[in-house]
Image: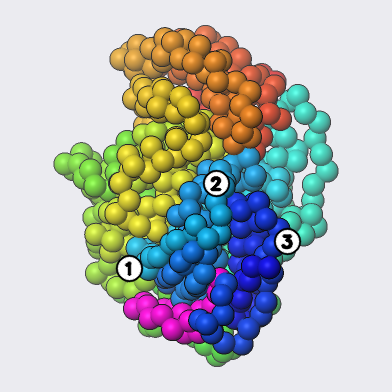
Amino acid sequence: MQMIYRIGNGETIKYSARELAKYLTLVTGKDCFQIVEKSSYDKALQGIWLGSDDQIGVNFEVQDKALDDGIAIAIVKGNGFITGTNERSILIGVYRFLTELGCRWLRPCKDGEVLIHKALEDMNVELKEIASLRHRGVVIEGSNTYDNVKDMIEWLPKLGYNSYFIQFMHAYSFFKQWYIHAENPLKQKEFFDDEMAEEFTEGLVKEIKKRGLIYHAVGHGWTCEAIGVPGRGWDAEKIALTDEQRECLALINGKREFYGNVPLNTNLCYSSPKVQEAFTDGIVNYAKTHKEADMIHVWVADAFNNHCECERCKTLTPTDWYVQILNVLDEKLSAEGLDNKIAFLLYFELLWTPIKEKLHHPERFVMMFAPISRTFTKSFEDVEEVQEELKPFALNKITLPHTITNYLKILKEWQACFDGDSFDFDYHLGRSHYGDAGYYEISRIISKDVKNLRNLGLNGLLSCQQQRTFFPTALPNYVMGRTLWNVEAEFEEVARDYFKYAFGEGWGLVKEYLMQVSDIFDMDYWQLESGGLNQAYSEEVIKVCEVVDKFESVALAHQNHEHITENLSWKYILYHLEYTKLFAKALSAKAKGETEKANAYWSEFAHYINRHEDEMQRGFDGFRILSIGRWASHFTRSN
């Protein structure tokens, strides 16, 4: 028997040992690995040891061992140790050991893995690293099955990610859209309710905790919680309000009512002592009953230019009231002996710094920079000359910035007020990526952004994104994870590594094809709702049809691989051919002003996506692109 010794009885180190035994069995072809618990490290015993840095005797210079990940691997001829700053780090170290041997994790699930064959005695890996950035995570968005999200959580530590964020009290909205098949008339609606959403969320939290990932929680919904109404998504709802509830809503144009009939988008009268009390009590009660939440996000309404105009609220800015509420929350959490970290956001009106208020105990808080309206055709490295005026704050008359320059100016102003922990909460794979049908340029932007985070004073990235972002490839998330772990990782090297393992023979042709597709598409035309008349883009984007036609014979020649991972990679490329042409035709007609033609192409595009949804389900979120197409007023279609 080959021994795997683990020091400790925690859930994550147990899981780490099981994962190591599982993959070593597959790699060596020998089912001979036995896991044994030990109380202390004994290097005289042959085998692979798993334990914390203190137990193994390795020193890491990090600020916070619970949050900062360091790994050390010292294995010679199949014997030695894998250690880390915490149990999560040990799990990341297990996957890193296997990666160094030649294994790869290109997508979630078995058909995203590439496993090498190697004898145990030929395994030699020695390294010691600390992750470049503390915050390395993914946020739930889009339309998903339970397994879609579970598979994503399982995949993350294999790439070096350490965090997962489930928005809302429970993730109802992100499951409902799948189960009711909101954009696919070819499928029958399925039953889904709050009870199922709660069960799904509880199950996913267990998966997060099993891997020792940092669990970020809630964000959306506190405003609804404070007045006792559901806050589970962005749907308009008809809810009868009591007088007591109504007086808590923001006064806008002389009325207190739900903003656009969407409770989640409705701000409250934040100067009201009653509102402050209810708002903060809701968060404290959640913290008391959800000890598993490592970081609780405290956000206000998900809309802008709808803050309260009552005489009392107008005496301070929305950000000042927000900071005041955060301080009340901090006092209450401290009184209860609760040490949860609180993430506060720079978003919409809160992009403008407070004038009078400041956080009393900044060590409790983590700043979340959320440049929701930024361009993705430029990175944080590509600072433009100022192209738009960043206007002073004016109540309910703000204009969101789009340029990187102005967003970084906002960040710098906030950093003068708060010098604590912080991260970028960004949207590379939330909407913009669909405007890059090749996924290559958005991957390059991700790489450049991540490399510049430390220069901007930000300690990581949480990616607010669709979970099914593997069509035509999973390169964006692959690059993101690898670069968040090591900001020195060169984009082209990571991309070459991905394509070689994903496609095998012919990988260079696929890479060249997707680069050409990306060069032709324009993310800003899609992302920034600038999709009006644009003759130049109309003529440019339609050129992709010729690129696709030239590549089709290559794709057809690589069908039906024996290796399941390469087979799925090429299968996605085959679906991508027609997808790209139909998308380009719709965009070209739209940019030319041929509305009827554009909508006809869009209907054909939607039908293609819906007809092939089962084949592409794990890799592509069809609901999201189709809903964006309508929501951004690009296209209309009839079901």
Question: Which of pointers 1 and 2 indicates the residue nearer the eye?
Answer: 2
Q: Is residue 126 visible?
A: yes
Residue at (34% x, 42% y) in the render: 493
223 sits to left or right of 482 = right
Q: Where does the image place residue 519, in percent across and percent down from the top left?
A: 34, 25
> What amino acid type should be assigned to the residue bearing mark 1?
Pro
Residue linked to disc 1: 354
Q: Where does the image place residue 402, in percent across and percent down from the top left?
A: 32, 42
Residue linked to disc 3: 203
Disc 1: CA contacts within 10 A as few (<14), some (14-19) or many (>=20): some
Question: Which of the two discs, 1 and 2, labels the residue nearer the N terminus?
Answer: 2
Residue 9 or 607: which is nearer the viewer?
Answer: 9
> What amino acid type should be assigned to the residue bearing mark 3?
Gly
Question: Which of the two discs, 3 and 1, labels the residue nearer the N terminus?
Answer: 3
Residue 215 or 36: which is nearer the viewer?
Answer: 36
Disc 2: CA contacts within 10 A as few (<14), some (14-19) or many (>=20): some
> What amino acid type should be assigned to the residue bearing mark 2?
Ile
The residue stretch that appears in magenta: 48-65
User: Considering only vertical position in the picture, is 204 above or below 397?
Assistant: below
Q: Please identify the quarter of the rendering in which residue 533 is found.
A: top left
**Mark 1 secondary-structure assignment:** loop
Residue at (24% x, 47% y) in the render: 381
User: Considering only vertical position in the picture, is 450 above or below 59?
Assistant: above
State yes or no: residue 18 in magenta: no
**Mark 3 secondary-structure assignment:** helix
Residue linked to disc 2: 116
